[in-house]
Image (cartoon, rainbow, N blue to C red):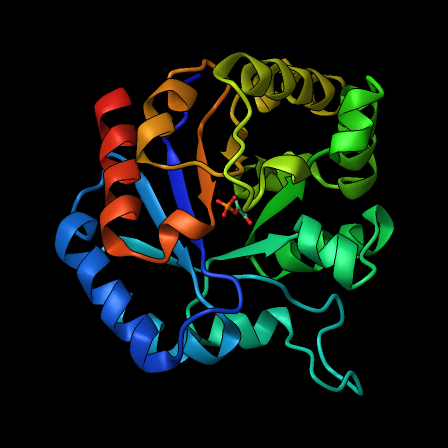
Amino acid sequence: MSRKYLIAGNWKMNLTPDDSAALVEEINAVVGTQTSVQVCVCPPFTSLPVVSDKVEQTEVHLGAQNMHAEPSGAYTGEISAEMLRSLYVSHVILGHSERRQYCGETNASINQKILAAIQANLKPIYCVGETLGEREAGKTMEIVSTQVREGLEGYPSSALDLLVIAYEPVWAIGTGKTATDEMAQEVHAGIRQVLTEMFGEADASSIRILYGGSMKPENAAGLLAQPDVDGGLIGGASLSAKPFCDIVEAAIAAE
Ligand code: PEP
């Protein structure tokens, strides 16, 4: 099954609307018309309107970094799936390790968000990954399998075309330490095995599994060459157009 690469930029809590507009214009100019690789930018909520306008006539997709599971109501400070849809957001990062660590998100609470996202036809980019301590204790696959199974509890097979998984070893995020190509492939293959047990081989083989954790132009080609690595979720290197577009170019070359 051929899976189109997806390169998604997670801008985290960075960039004002003006900064965001400038960055996405640069990205548009370099990779905004090509279609061989899917490109998605995920600005902070405050920049979604301006970036939405800027990507409207391009091939660049728009993602959010979080959403609430409920459609509306007394949830001060929260944003719903429908609000994202109204800004033409197509993707939403859910379960990022920073939200698990700082905002108390759990597999169960993320599961509610994933199910709400697909109800609204948003594509969840579901983040999973082990901490350094878990890796050193030999528990990587146990942790990641549980995250996949619990986060996707009750996920309907009919919506699997929306699903993206991102394997992000916590020890590699923002640290400059990257999983080796082999380490990434081993976990990605393990995730696909879990997806096969949950949904069957044909469906599992169509789900994209991105790698995230200090991906940059220098290591992108090796990671993207792995058979089960279907793209990247990029943090630090997505905050400037040059490294981000160079990673997109590496994916185009690997197609
Ligand atoms: C991320 O936070 O999703 C990420 C991959 O960050 P970085 O690329 O900076 O490690």
Q: Residue at x 28, y 45 (%)?
A: 243
Q: Vertical placement of 132 versus 197: above or below?
A: below
Q: Residue at x 53, y 12 (%)?
A: 182
Q: Could you tell me how many numbered marks the image carries?
A: 0
Query: Residue 89: where, in percent of width, then height?
Result: 45, 65
User: Can residue 154 be seen from the camera position used here?
Assistant: no
Furthest-front residue in view?
Answer: 176
Residue 217 placement, left or right of 35 = right
Q: Residue at x 31, y 34 (%)?
A: 217
Residue 119 placement, left or right of 233 = right
Q: Vertical placement of 222 versus 19: above or below?
A: above
User: Can residue 6 be seen from the camera position used here?
Assistant: yes
Q: Residue at x 67, y 22 (%)?
A: 191
Q: Nearer the viewer, residue 241 or 200?
A: 241
Residue 228 placement, left or right of 115 = left
Query: Residue 53: where, in percent of width, then height?
Result: 29, 75
Quarter holding the C terminus is top left
Q: Vertical placement of 51 versus 134: above or below?
A: below
When asked about the image quadrant of residue 61, the answer is bottom left
